Image (cartoon, coloured by chain):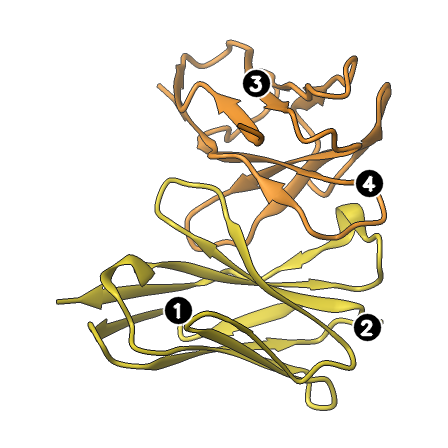
Chain colours: A orange, B yellow
Amino acid sequence: DGGITQSPKYLFRKEGQNVTLSCEQNLNHDAMYWYRQDPGQGLRLIYYSQIVNDFQKGDIAEGYSVSREKKESFPLTVTSAQKNPTAFYLCASSIDPWEDTQYFGPGTRLTVL
Amino acid sequence: KNQVEQSPQSLIILEGKNCTLQCNYTVSPFSNLRWYKQDTGRGPVSLTIMTFSENTKSNGRYTATLDADTKQSSLHITASQLSDSASYICVVSPRRGSQGNLIFGKGTKLSVKP
């Protein structure tokens, strides 16, 4: 059963704590992306990766970090430096960096208490 | 500034009725336009994709149109069903392989009532 998965679905964090969101895909896609979605706003790009061991900052990278050690995995760490981390986080992938069709995971809702 | 504007912000219709969602963009250059459907609490799913030369694209009860001259697109839903209740997002790509430069609209939230 191919697809892109994110875990956990819901995540609660205390202020000042770092937290890592998981994103895994078995579609053999080269490119992966992380977006943030807030109510009443369009998706905003946090980071993207074209290939293993490579990634670029998106529009709102401050307070976030990523790694791409494996083709299948692109975890996102929300650090304590992110001032307003409560949001819905979406991971996506595409076949290669030149393919615009992105396939999205089910999302993780992060709430800071 | 590259922007994608969608209207209306929200819409309520009765089951079985048709509706049309609008997307206006000021993105240049332009490669393609996509419509995504996003169920509440889920990730978006692609419905249609249109390039500069395409005027209409259908996917079942969903029909998207594109007027590249006026930079407008619409998504028409025929014979709506309760399962059509979702947010519909218009996404514009400035050039092929835009990767991190896709322009997302804020979406139209559609509610279909019985």
Residue A77 location, quadrant: top right
Quarter-wise, where is residue A92 in the image? top right
Foreground disc of the pair 3, 1: 3
User: Is there a contact, CB below 8 Å, between mark 3 and mark 1?
Assistant: no
The three-letter code of the residue at mark 4 reads Asp
Subunit under mark 2:
B
Left or right of residue A105: residue A48:
right
Pointer 1 local density, CA inside 10 Å: few below 14, some 14–19, many at least 20: some
Name the residue carrying label 1: B9
Report the chain holding disc 1.
B
- Rounded to the nearest whole Å, what is the CA distance between mark 1 and mark 2? 24 Å
Alpha carbons under labels 3 and 4: distance apart: 21 Å
Dot 4 corresponds to which residue? A96
> Helix, strand or loop at disc 3?
strand
Q: Is B70 rendered above or below residue A71?
A: below
Which label sits in the foreground, 3 or 4?
Answer: 4
A38 vs B39, left or right, is: right
- Amino acid type of the residue tagged 3 in the rendering: Ser
Asked which secondary structure carries label 2, the reply is: loop
